Image: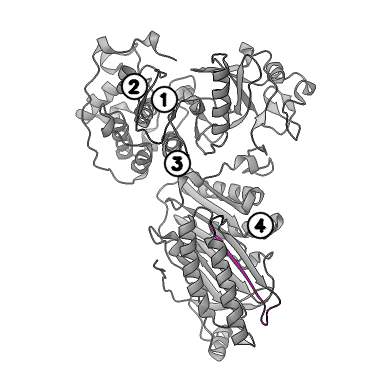
Amino acid sequence: MTVTKHKSTISSCLIKSPNLLYRSGSLSQPTSGDPICIMRSVLGFVVLILWSRVTVGEPQANLLQDGCSLFNVRNASAFAATFNDTLADLRSSISASNSSLFATVHRPRAPQSVYALFQCRSYLSSADCLACFSAAEGHIRRCGAAHGGRVIYDGCFLRYESTLFFDQVTPSENRNSCGVRNAATGGFTASVRSLVADLSAATPRIPKFFAAAEREGVLAVAQCVETVSEEGCEQCLAAAVGNVMRCLPSADGRALGAGCFMRYSDESFFPANRTVDLSPYLTNSGDSSRGTKFQGLLNFRYKDLKNATNNFSEKNKVGEGGFGGVYQVKSSTVKDVAFLMNHNFQVKFLGKGHLKNGTTVAVKRLAIAQTSRARAEFQSEVKLISNIHHRNLVRLLGYSSKHENFLLVYEYMANNSLDKFIFGDKRGFLNWGQRFGIIVGMARGLSYLHQEFHIRIIHRDIKCSNILLDDDFQPRVADFGLARLLPEDKTHLSTVFAGTFGYTAPEYAIHGQLSEKVDTYGYGIVVLEIISGRQCNDLKLEPATQYIRDWAWKLYEQDRLLEMVDETMDPNDYSPEEVKRIIKIALLCTQFTVAARPTMSETVVLLLSQTDVALQLTRPAFIDASEMIDEEEAVE
């Protein structure tokens, strides 16, 4: 593993550690009369803070900061023996099969006491964590017989002292490290501010004090040392937020110190399956808080859900999907639902669909056969999807299965489904930035289901009505948990048709062949709808434009793609070249040949590329009308 350093001219200043004096640095030029420079020459001890850009492919090898105490121990030989044993114990702990990527060692009774702590970012693999430790170990040995030292990499943190420091956070020592490239998108700064504020609020409440999240093209992580208190973590991250925001509008920024670490970027630097749903850890205080502290999957009583939805009244109904109706909770009195959940806390409603803490939930009644097998499959899938947490997937909160009806309880999306905003009564509300965010978010959610969750899940029914929008108009894919699962050892399977006319890939509609590329096809159709403001099939239009995919291909062949753009969008609000690029990606997703379509993870990469990628598009062999699935026979 290569350790990367970026050399800079730095000036030095003293940082007061609780136990020791450290020398740190900034990127300003030193003055000739700087007393610290004089002290440095007198002591003959140089300590550097080294900043560097990310090493692509080796994030754990990117050295961010190092420092050594200004004072040496008295008994250097005794210290060396104890220090060697301490590092060996740390390595042993990190190398263990059950390692949590965190370890502490303390030897208070040795001839020279040593306390040491090592922590990896939780998104690293065990092998990468061990490699990062090796780099940190080699580097910190340069401190020689110093009373203490610390090394911070992008991937890990190593510190030792002669006195106990495990519970210290020293927020005053927190510093930032900013990238040299500015973000390309205009809304990036606002997205960073929102996301890092949420991370700062949520991380102290998350086990092991680590969270990774992505939102609107921003990826970010926050982490505190596991041995600090929740209050200490809050204090450290509060300082980190202030420092990391000073990096804006840089596309990459970090805040680092002895107690915590925070980073944001417009490029991926952690696996997508390590993201955390922050909403359960956010309270209702503060601008960034929108979630509720739900703790695990909840088992609802059927009679309470029935009462809360007014016996599944049509007045409470907010949608109808392929598996059943969706209802918003209603309660005329708090007493009706005071004990709605069989759980260790009480949930009460203030009014129609609103919990006392401001949360609204949606109840989905499923139209599934009432058999013991169906019940077992239902409970099995509920347990599975309860572990699915992604920013772009609707979250399951609870269920009920002890009655003739199977019920699922989801987080409620106040903005309802995407179709209302594309070709419904709210058409024209979404600008291009919001539409593009929805296009990217959908792709990320599906990519997670296909390749990043531990069991591959195929949705099979991607359409605008199955894409919900949260308060920030970020997309949440719904109904994914009711799809069949694709075994890891198979590339495709055949099953009963369960799609919607117009969105369904031809190989699935005709032959019943199911793969994740079926979702890619449906996704491409939805993208065309988002851009055009039209439904995939609309017989009220003139024949040349009735079928959205056919129309898009004709415009593509004639180099007239911009004629497809929704006329309700402000032409000054979008880049024509960007819109054409996204339409081409949608056409690639709807290729007739399965192998020609990209995976959803490949689609995400295409969407986020800033240049017009040369796409190999082949005009589809359109299905003959006599072979089409009749619209009335398609499962809605």
In this orientation, which residue lies closer to the viewer: 336 or 439? Answer: 336
Residue drawn at x 29%, y 39% is 577
Residue drawn at x 24%, y 38% is 615
Q: Quadrant of residue 472?
A: top right
Q: Are marks 1 and 3 in contact (CB under 8 Å)?
A: no
Query: Element type at marker 4?
Result: helix
The residue that mark 4 highlights is: 233
* Separation of residues labelled 2 and 3 (CA atoms): 23 Å
- Name the amino acid type tagged 4: Cys
- Name the amino acid type tagged 2: Tyr
Where residue 588 appears, as percent x and y from the top left, is 28, 33
Where does the C terminus fall, quadrant-wise?
A: top left
Query: Element type at marker 3?
Result: helix
Residue 41 in view of the camera: yes
The residue that mark 2 highlights is: 508
**Among numbered discs 4 and 2, the one appearing first in the sequence:** 4
292 is higher (above) or lower (below) than 257? above
Looking at the rendered image, the disc whose residue lies closer to the viewer, 1 or 4, is 1
Q: Are marks 1 and 2 in contact (CB under 8 Å)?
A: yes
* Separation of residues labelled 4 and 2 (CA atoms): 51 Å
Residue drawn at x 42%, y 69% is 3
